[in-house]
Image: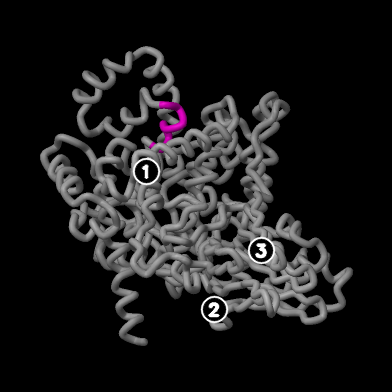
C-alpha cells in the first residue's frame, strides 16, 4: 500500500490551504480545473470509466489518480458511486473551496484523520497523521479502542487505535468546507438486504445469475501475465476458484498454495512480519499461518487469489451452524440452569459456544467471535482508564448496531453484521498486512462488488445452498470441496507480559490470573490470551520502530 498523508486548514488572514506529503502520495493536479487528488488503491473499472470520461474531457492522463480527478470534475462528490475496487481518496476542490474524501464499499483501504477547529490532518495510516491532536504523553492505545479490541478482536471504525485520530468507516465520504470549517460525513453505499420479491424467488432462479457472476469476477482477476497463485484453504469456494482458473488458463499457469500443516516453521518471525504490516492491532490466530502459506508465492506468482471473506458472505461460518441450536437452547433452558449447572459442567471445549447463549441478541455474535466477554473486559482494564459509564456506552453501541440491521432472518442479519464490521476490521486488514509482508498483490474475487451485491440479496437461510449449487461445476474435481475448511494451524500461546500491557491500560494482576486459570484448566481463554499476546507484540514493534526513527533522526 503506497498511502498518502497531509493536512488542510483555514487561516483567517490568508485563506484556505492544503499541504500533502509528496513522497507518500499518488497525486494528480489540474490547474485549469482547480482540482488536486491524493489517491491510494486501485480502480478495477478504470478502463470503462476512462472511456466514459473521454466523451467530455479533451485528454485524461494515464493513472487512477487522474481518472478520479476528471470523474470528480464531471460528477462531483457522487463520483465514488461510479468507482469499483479498493481505494481511499482525497480531493481538494479549489473552486468549491472544500476538501472531499471517501473510502471504498467494503473498506479495503483506510483513511484516517485528526480534526480540530480550522485544521484537519489526514493519512492512510494512523501513525502517519501529521501532528495528531493527541498529547505527547497519551497512552499508546486509546482507552475506547482498547475495549473495542478486547470485545471485537479489532478496533472498529470510526474509532482509531491512536488518541485524537479517527477512521472513516467503509463506504463513507466526507466534505470539509474550507470557508466555514463545517465537517459533514455520510454513507454513500450499503449492502443490499433481501426484499419480499427476493424471499419469494424460487431456489433455481438464483443459481444461474450467481454462477454467471462468479465466472465474471474470477475471470476479471486472470488478466495478469505470468503465474496466478491461489491461496487454497480447503473451503469449497477456494476449490471452485482454483478449478475455474485452471480451466481458463491451464494447470501450468495456476498454482494453488496449500495452508501449512500442524507445524509452523519460524512462527515468531512470520508473526512479526505480519504485525509490522498491521496499522492497528488485530486478534487473529492465523496471522503466522497466512504468512507461511503465502511466502512460497513471492517472486513466482504475479498475483494471488484468495477466498477470504467467503465464509461470512456465504453464511458458512461456524456461528451460522450454531444458530438453530442456540434458538432451541435459549427457549428451553432457564438462565439460572445455564449459569450454575451447564456452563460449569460443560468444560473448556463448549465454553465459546455457551458464552453466546442466554445473552441479549445484540451481544450474541460478539461473544462467539470476540476474545472476551464484557465482564472479563471490565476486570482486565484499569479502573482509571475505563469508567463504568463509558463501558455502558460501548455496549449501547452494540445494541444500536444490531438494531440498525433490521432483518427477520438471523442468518442474513449475522451476514450483514460480519460485512459491516469484520470485513473492514479483520478480514481485509489481514490481507493488506499479508500483501505488505510478502510483497504479493492479493485479489479477492468473492468480495467484488458485483458478486457481493448479488449474493447479499439471496436469503440467508438459502444462501449457502444456492451458491454451492451455482459453483457445483467446479467442485467435483476437488475432494477437499466435500470437506469442511481446513483449520489453520495456530501457533502455541505466547504468554503475554502483564507489565508490558500495563502501559496500554490493562491490569497486570488480572492478566496473570487469566494465565493461571487457563494453565490450570479452570477456564478456556486461549483465544483471549492470544489476543493479548498479539497486542503485546504489536505494541513492541511500534516501540521499536519509534526508537529506530528517533535514532535515525
In the rendered structure, the answer to whether residue 147 lies left or right of residue 118 reads left
Q: What residue sits 42% from the left and 60% below the top?
A: 163
Q: Is residue 92 above or below residue 445?
A: below
- Cα–Cα gap, marks 2 and 3: 26 Å
List x then y, in percent, for residue 522.
15, 35
Report helix, strand or loop for mark 3. loop
List x then y, in percent, for residue 215.
64, 50
Q: Which residue is mark 1?
A: 151
Q: What residue sits 63% from the left and 48% below the top?
A: 214
Q: Which residue is mark 3?
A: 181
Q: Which residue is mark 2?
A: 24
Report helix, strand or loop for mark 2. loop
| Magenta part of the chain | 360-366
Q: Which residue sits furthest left?
A: 520
List x then y, in percent, for residue 249.
59, 62
Q: What residue sits 36% from the left and 30% below the top?
A: 356
Circle 2: is it few (<14), some (14-19), or many (20+) Cα within 10 Å? Answer: some
Residue 369, visible in the rendered structure: no
Figure quadrant of residue 535: bottom left
- Cα–Cα gap, marks 1 and 2: 34 Å
Sequence order check: which comes first, mark 1 or mark 2?
2
List x then y, in percent, for residue 337.
26, 16
In the rendered structure, the answer to whether residue 366 lies left or right of residue 228 reads left
Report helix, strand or loop for mark 1. helix
Q: What residue sits 33% from the left and 46% below the top?
A: 386
In the rendered structure, the answer to whether residue 419 lies left or right of residue 161 reads right
What secondary structure do most residues of the magenta stretch adopt? helix
Label pair 2/3, CB-CB below 8 angstroms: no
Q: Nearer the viewer, mark 1 or mark 3?
A: 3
Amino acid at each position: 500500500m503506497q498511502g498518502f498523508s497531509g493536512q488542510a486548514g483555514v487561516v483567517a488572514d490568508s485563506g484556505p490551504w492544503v499541504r500533502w506529503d509528496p513522497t507518500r502520495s499518488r497525486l494528480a493536479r489540474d490547474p485549469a480545473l482547480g482540482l488536486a487528488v491524493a489517491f491510494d488503491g486501485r480502480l478495477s473499472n478504470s478502463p470503462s470509466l476512462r472511456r466514459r470520461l473521454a466523451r467530455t474531457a479533451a485528454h485524461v492522463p494515464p493513472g487512477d489518480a487522474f481518472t478520479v480527478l476528471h470523474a470528480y470534475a464531471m460528477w462531483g462528490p457522487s463520483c465514488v458511486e461510479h468507482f469499483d475496487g479498493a481505494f481511499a481518496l482525497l480531493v481538494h476542490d479549489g473552486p468549491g473551496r472544500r476538501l472531499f474524501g471517501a473510502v471504498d464499499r467494503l473498506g479495503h483501504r483506510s483513511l484516517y484523520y485528526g480534526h480540530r477547529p480550522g485544521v484537519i490532518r489526514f493519512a492512510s495510516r494512523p501513525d502517519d497523521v501529521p501532528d495528531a491532536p493527541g498529547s505527547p504523553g497519551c497512552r499508546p492505545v486509546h482507552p475506547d479502542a482498547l475495549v473495542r479490541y478486547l470485545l471485537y478482536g479489532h478496533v472498529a471504525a470510526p474509532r482509531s487505535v491512536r488518541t485524537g485520530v479517527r477512521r472513516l468507516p467503509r463506504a463513507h465520504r466526507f466534505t470539509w468546507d474550507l470557508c466555514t470549517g463545517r465537517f459533514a460525513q455520510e454513507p454513500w453505499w450499503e449492502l443490499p438486504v433481501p426484499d419480499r420479491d427476493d424471499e419469494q424467488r424460487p431456489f433455481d432462479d438464483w443459481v444461474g445469475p450467481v454462477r454467471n457472476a462468479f465466472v465474471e469476477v474470477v475471470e476479471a482477476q486472470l488478466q495478469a501475465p505470468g503465474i496466478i497463485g491461489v491461496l487454497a484453504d480447503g473451503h469449497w469456494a477456494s476449490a471452485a476458484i482454483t478449478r475455474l482458473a485452471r480451466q481458463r488458463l491451464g494447470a501450468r499457469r495456476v498454482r494453488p498454495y496449500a495452508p501449512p500443516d500442524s507445524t509452523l516453521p519460524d512462527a515468531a518471525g512470520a508473526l512479526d512480519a505480519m504485525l509490522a504490516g498491521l496499522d492497528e492491532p488485530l486478534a487473529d490466530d492465523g496471522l503466522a499461518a497466512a504468512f507461511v502459506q503465502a511466502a512460497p508465492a513471492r517472486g513466482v506468482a504475479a498475483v494471488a487469489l484468495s477466498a477470504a471473506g467467503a465464509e461470512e458472505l456465504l453464511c458458512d461460518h461456524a456461528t451460522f451452524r450454531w444458530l438453530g441450536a442456540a434458538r432451541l437452547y435459549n427457549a428451553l433452558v432457564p438462565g439460572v440452569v445455564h449459569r450454575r449447572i451447564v456452563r460449569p459442567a460443560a468444560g473448556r471445549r463448549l465454553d465459546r459456544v455457551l458464552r453466546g447463549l442466554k445473552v441479549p441478541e445484540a451481544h450474541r455474535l460478539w461473544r462467539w467471535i470476540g476474545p472476551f466477554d464484557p465482564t472479563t473486559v471490565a476486570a482486565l482494564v484499569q479502573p482509571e482508564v475505563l469508567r463504568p459509564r463509558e463501558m455502558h456506552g460501548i455496549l449501547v453501541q452494540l445494541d444500536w448496531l444490531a438494531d440498525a440491521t433490521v432483518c427477520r432472518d438471523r442468518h442474513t442479519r449475522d451476514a450483514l453484521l460480519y460485512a459491516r464490521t469484520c470485513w473492514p476490521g479483520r478480514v481485509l486488514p489481514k490481507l493488506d498486512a499479508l500483501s505488505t509482508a510478502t510483497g504479493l498483490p492479493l485479489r479477492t474475487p468473492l468480495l467484488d462488488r458485483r458478486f457481493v451485491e448479488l449474493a447479499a440479496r439471496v436469503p440467508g437461510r438459502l444462501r449457502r445452498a444456492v451458491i454451492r449449487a451455482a459453483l457445483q461445476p467446479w467442485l467435483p474435481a476437488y475432494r477437499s470441496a466435500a470437506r469442511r475448511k481446513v483449520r489453520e494451524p495456530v501457533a502455541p500461546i505466547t504468554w503475554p507480559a502483564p507489565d508490558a500491557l500495563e502501559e496500554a491500560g490493562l491490569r497486570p494482576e488480572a492478566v496473570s490470573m487469566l494465565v493461571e486459570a487457563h494453565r490450570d484448566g479452570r477456564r478456556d481463554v486461549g483465544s483471549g490470551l492470544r489476543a493479548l499476546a498479539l497486542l503485546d507484540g504489536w505494541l513492541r514493534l511500534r516501540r521499536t520502530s519509534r526508537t529506530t526513527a528517533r535514532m535515525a533522526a
